[in-house]
Image: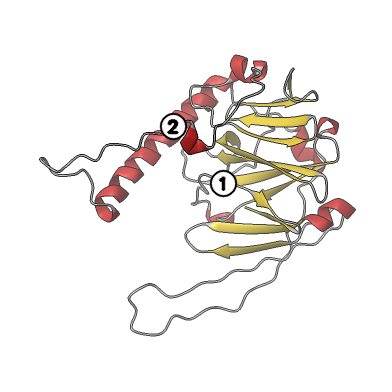
Amino acid sequence: MTVRLGWLLLSAVAAAFLLLCVAIGGASTEAKEQGQKAQGSPTPTKTTKPSVGTNHPDPPSVLRRPSTTTPEESAALERRLEKMREQTDAANAKRYRGGIPPLGAPVVAPTKVTRESVGGLLVRKNYRNTVAQAQSSTLTEPAAAADEREVLYAGNTYLSRSTDSGATWVNAGPYPAGPADAPEACCDTDVVHASTTDTTFNVILYTNNALTNGVVRIFVRRGNISDGVDCTYTIDPAGTSNNIVPDYPHIATDNNYLYL
C-alpha cells in the first residue's frame, strides 16, 4: 500500500496523503519541501525547487512490537511535556504578545456565551466511554471520528472503539512501541474518517524519554474500524538528526488528501 505525500516545511511540517492510493492499495509517496531565507534579509526571498521522494508504509512488524511504557510512565511523560509547553508559551507571550498586562491596566470581561449565541445546541445522547474512564490520565486530550455506527475514540493513554454509536466501548489495545529514536507513545492523538475512501486515520506523537526527539505515527484502517489496522506510516521530520519534536500533530482530509 502506498500513499502519496506532499509536505511543506515552515515552522511545522504539513503532510498530504493521496487517499485514492490508500483505497486501492497503491504504494508511492511524493514529498515536497520549500524553504526561504530568513526574514529581514536585504536580498529577495528565494524558494527552493521542490524535491521528490518516497515514503513507504512501515513493515507490519511495527504493530507486533509491544510498548514497555506503563500508563504511569506515559502520564508522567505527558506532564513533563506539558510543563515544557507552558514554559515555551510564557516565553513567547513576553516576546510576541506583550506578556502580563501592567498593573492598573483595564480588565476586559469575557464574553458571556448564551444558549442562543451557540445556536441552541441540543445533546440527544450522552454515553460514557468506559475505556476512557478506566485508563485516561488527567490530561486526556481526546479525539474521535465516526464511520456510521462505528466510532474510534483515542486519548493520550488509551484507544477505544464502539460499534453501536457509543453506547458500549471496547479497548482497542495499547499503542505499539515507537522506533528506537522515539520509542514512547506520548500523547497528542487525533482521529479522522475519510468518507470518500471509507478510511479511518489516527495519529499519536512518539518521543524519547528526554523529550528531545519525536515522530508521528499514522495508523490506517480501511473499511470497518473494528477490522483493525491495515498499515502505518511513521513521519520523522528530524531524520537521523534526532532533534525535533513535532508537537501537537493534527490531521484533516479532503476528497483526495490526508493533511498532517
Q: Position of residue 220 (x, y in %)?
A: 77, 43
- Numbered disc in front, either 1 or 2: 2
In the displayed structure, does residue 75 sit left or right of residue 145?
left
Q: Which residue is mark 1?
A: 249
Badge 1 density bin: few <14, some 14–19, many ≥20, Cα 10 Å: some
Residue at 56% across, 46% down: 249
**Amino acid on which disc 2 is placed:** Thr
Residue at 33% across, 83% down: 42
Instruction: State the residue in front, 211 or 202.
Output: 202
Q: Is residue 85 above or below residue 75?
A: below
Instruction: State the residue in front, 109 or 155.
Output: 109
Secondary structure at numbered mark 2: loop
**Amino acid on which disc 1 is placed:** Pro
Q: Which residue is mark 2?
A: 114
Q: Residue furthest left?
A: 104
Q: Is residue 259 above or below residue 105?
A: below
Q: Is residue 223 above or below residue 123?
A: below
Badge 2 density bin: few <14, some 14–19, many ≥20, Cα 10 Å: few
